[in-house]
Image: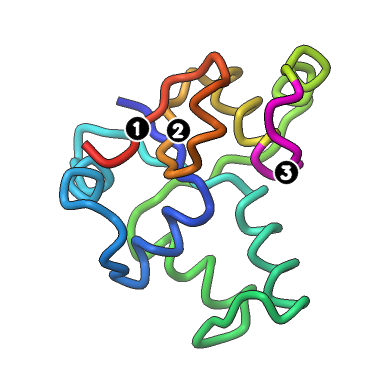
C-alpha cells in the first residue's frame, strides 16, 4: 500500500501519542508499505510553530526532517500535476493544507491516513483507526 500521512498523524506517530491506533502504527511500520510525508505537512508544522500553536523539542527545520528520516518516511514534494486537481475538488474542507494533501493523494494514488472526518467526503482512499 502507498500511504500519505496527514500532518497530525505524523506528529502523533513520532511522539508516541496514544491517539494513534496500533493498527495504524502497524501500517506505517510495515515494510511492504511505501509511506510518505508531504512537504505541505512540514510547511504546516513550521507555520503553526511560528504562530505558537505547535511546540517541538527542537527547531522545526531540524526536528521534522530528522524524525521523517529516522522513521524511514519518504518525502513527497509538491508538483504541478497535483495542484491541477485543486479546481475540481468540492468545497468540503476549508483548510488549504488538507486540500493540497487530498490533491496529492489523488495524483499519486495514495491512501491518506487521517482522523479528519471531513476528508472522508473526498474521492480518495482513507485509513483511520482500524
Residue at screen point 21% across, 36% down: 130
The percent position of residue 49, horizontal first and vertical second, equals 68, 76
The quarter in which the N terminus is drawn is top left
> Is 92 covered by the magenta stretch?
yes
**Residue 44 circle label:** none
Q: Which mark is in front, 2 or 3?
A: 3
The image quadrant of residue 19 is bottom left
The residue labelled by disc 2 is 112
- Give the CA separation, mark 1 to mark 2: 6 Å
The residue labelled by disc 1 is 127
The percent position of residue 88, horizontal first and vertical second, equals 77, 12
Name the residue at the bottom extreme: 57
Nearest to the observer: residue 46 or residue 116: 116
- Give the CA separation, mark 2 to mark 3: 16 Å
127 displayed left or right of 58: left
Total numbered badges shown on the rendered structure: 3
The residue labelled by disc 3 is 95
Mark earlier in primary sequence (1, 3): 3
Amino acid at each position: 500500500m502507498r500511504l500519505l500521512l496527514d500532518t497530525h498523524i505524523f506528529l502523533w506517530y513520532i511522539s508516541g501519542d496514544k491517539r494513534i491506533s496500533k493498527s495504524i502504527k502497524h501500517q506505517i511500520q510495515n515494510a511492504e508499505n511505501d509511506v510518505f510525508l508531504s512537504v505541505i505537512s512540514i510547511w504546516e508544522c513550521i507555520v503553526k510553530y511560528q504562530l505558537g500553536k505547535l511546540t517541538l523539542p527542537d527547531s522545526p527545520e531540524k526536528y521534522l526532517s530528522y524524525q521523517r528520516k529516522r522513521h524511514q518516511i519518504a518525502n513527497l514534494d509538491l508538483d504541478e500535476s497535483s495542484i491541477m486537481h485543486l479546481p475540481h475538488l468540492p468545497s468540503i474542507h476549508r483548510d488549504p493544507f488538507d486540500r493540497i494533501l487530498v490533491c496529492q493523494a489523488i495524483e499519486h494514488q495514495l491512501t491518506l491516513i487521517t482522523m479528519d472526518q471531513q476528508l472522508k467526503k473526498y474521492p480518495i482512499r482513507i485509513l483511520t483507526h482500524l
